[in-house]
Image (tube, rainbow, N blue to C red):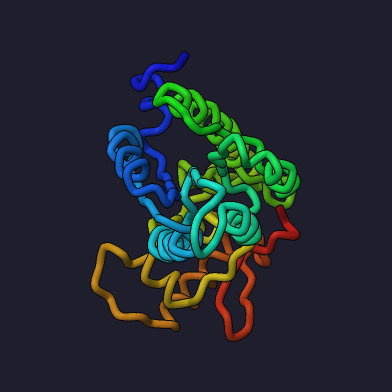
Amino acid sequence: MINPEELYRISSAKSILFVEDDSILRQSAEIMFKELFALVDTAGDGKSALLAYHDYYNKHRHYYDIVITDIKMPRMSGIELTSELYKIHKDQSIIVISAHDDSEYLIELINLGVSSFIQKPFSTQNMIDKIYDVCLNLDNHHDNQRNISINGNYVWCHDAKCMLHDNQEIKLTKNEKRLLYLLFSDPLMTFKSHELFEFINSDTEEEFNANSLKSLIKRLRKKIPANLIENIYAEGYKINSDLL
C-alpha cells in the first residue's frame, strides 16, 4: 500500500490528463491530482480530451506523462480515444477506468496495448497504488531513453544537454544545445524552422531569421555527425533516425 508522500516523490514533476464524464468524480479527482502532479488537465469526453492532448503537445512539445480515461463517455468513448492516442504516441501511458459491465470491452483495450486498469467503484488508495506503478514504469523507461547512442561512437545525453564523442564532451554553445534538445525530444518529428528558432531564442524577443538558424545548424554540423540533422524540404528539420 503506497502513501501519497511516496507517490508525490515520483509524480510531482509529471503531467496528467483525466477524462471522465461524471463531473463530480472528475472534480474530486482533479483536487487530488493537483496535490500530486505538476500539471493536471481534465476533460468530460473523448473528443475534448483529444483536443486537449493536441493543445498540450503544441504548447509543451511533449505529451502528457499519464492519461486516465473512463470507457463509456459521450461524443467519443474511451476505447476510441485510446486508439487515437496510440496512433499519435505509441508509448503513451494510459490507465483505463472500467465498470463491472465493461468486460466486453477489455479484450479490445488489451489488444490496443492497454495494460493498466482500475475498476469502479475504486477508492483513493486504489488510484494511488495504480498511478504509483505507472509512474515507476515511466521512470524506468525514461532512464533507458535519456542517453541516445548515435552512429556507434556519439552519445546525446538528453537531461544534461550534452553530446559525447568517444566519451569526451563536445563543446557546444547554449543555442546548439537548445537546438539538439528540441530535436531529440521527439526524434521522429519534423520541426518547422520558426518553431526551432522560437525555442532557441525563447529568452529573447528576437524576430524569426531563417538565415540565422541555417548558420547555427551549419556550425553545429561541423561538431557532430554531418548527416545527423536532416533538412526536410519545405517542412523543416529532424533527427536522422537511421543513425540511432
Q: Position of residue 130 (x, y in %)?
A: 52, 28
In the image as oriented, which residue stretches furthest toward the top?
1
Above or below residue 181? Residue 95 is: above
Return the residue found at the far left: 205
Q: Farthest residue toward the front?
A: 101
* Residue occupying the point 47% across, 24% down: 126
**Percent position (x, y) of residue 31?**
28, 38
Rendered position, 235 above or below 163: below
| Residue 135 to residue 233: above or below | above
Q: Up-down: is 154 above or below 210?
A: above
- Drawn side of residue 211 relative to residue 190, left or right: left
**Going 65% across and 60% down the picture, which residue do you hit?**
87
- Depth check, front residue: 184 or 149: 184
Q: Is residue 175 left or right of residue 104?
A: left
Q: Is residue 179 visible?
A: no
Where residue 166 sits, quadrant-wise, is top right
Total marks shown come to: 0
The answer to whether residue 54 shows anywhere in this view is yes
Q: Position of residue 48 (x, y in %)?
A: 43, 63
Q: Nearer the viewer, residue 18 or 158?
A: 18
In the rendered image, residue 122, in percent from the top left (x then y), is placed at 47, 28
Identify the residue shown where x is 40% and y is 44%.
15
> Is 87 displayed left or right of 95 in the figure?
right
Q: Which picture quadrant has residue 146?
A: top right
Q: Residue furthest bottom?
A: 234
Measuring 60% from the left and 34% from the top, which residue is drawn there? 100
